[in-house]
Amino acid sequence: MTEIAIIRHGTTSWNKAGRLQGYSDIPLDEEGIQQALKLGQRLSSENWDLVFSSHLIRARQTAAIIAQELNIDSVFEDKRIGEAGGGLIEGTTEEERQEKWGVNWKQLDLGMEPRESVVQRGLSFLEEVVTENKGKKIVLVTHGSFIRQLLDTIVPAMHPTPAMKNTSFTRLLFANDNWNCELFNCVKHLD
């Protein structure tokens, strides 16, 4: 059995402002750094083998803090686990989107990365990681929309997957070609 801790990055100033980040490379704010530290301390009670991260700075910073708490020297970056691209809506709030494109903005083609693309790259990454690291415990630091879209596909009983909290911990188990979600969106380390 292979175990994956799938983690959403810590908070950023754009999270707090309600701005969609997508491919925009926004760093953690001070609270996000503290959240990552608390999660790293929580995970340090278990033995983890590897840490992977999205290439975006908010995920890389979160992963580096967690890896340090786990005494893991290297974080492996992979663009396939980057956030879903937001196209023209990146950097905007819901209010701004409605002002600019109307209440039905989600039905418009605003250059957002298609769900199929997000899922395809996520599945490609997961297949490679579980094939090359059978039986290991892997920390994967990524992004909210990416996680939701991936979980909707590999654990269809969860659909529609709720919004992910910053530094939430979701535990996935892979055995006999099946994914099982043992823990979802847990942030008890922030209490």
Image (cartoon, rainbow, N blue to C red):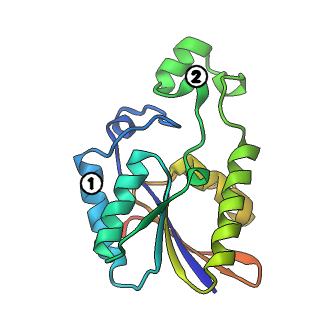
As shown in the figure, which amino acid type bears the numbered disc 2?
Leu
In the rendered structure, the answer to whether residue 184 lies left or right of residue 166 reads right
**Residue 160 in view (yes/no):** no
Tally of numbered discs: 2
Residue 171 location (% of width, % of height):
53, 73
Tag 1 secondary structure? helix
Q: Quadrant of residue 161?
A: bottom right
Q: Which residue is mark 1?
A: 33
Which numbered tag is attached to residue 25? none
Name which of mark 2 and mark 1 comes first in the sequence. Answer: 1
Q: Residue at x 33, y 79 (%)?
A: 44
Please tell me the numbered disc located at residue 88. 2
Residue 46 picture location, percent across and down: 39, 85
> Nearest the camera: 20 or 78?
78
Q: Nearer the viewer, residue 24 or 11?
A: 24
| Image position of 134 with respect to 14: above or below | below
Depth order, front residue of 159/173: 173
Local crowd size for mark 2, using a 10 Å CA cut-off: few (<14), some (14–19), many (≥20): few
User: Secondary structure beneath disc 2?
Assistant: helix
Question: In the picture provided, is 152 more to the left or to the right than 91?
Answer: right
Mark 1: amino acid:
Ile
Residue 101 at least partly seen: yes
Depicted 19 relative to depicted 8: above or below: above
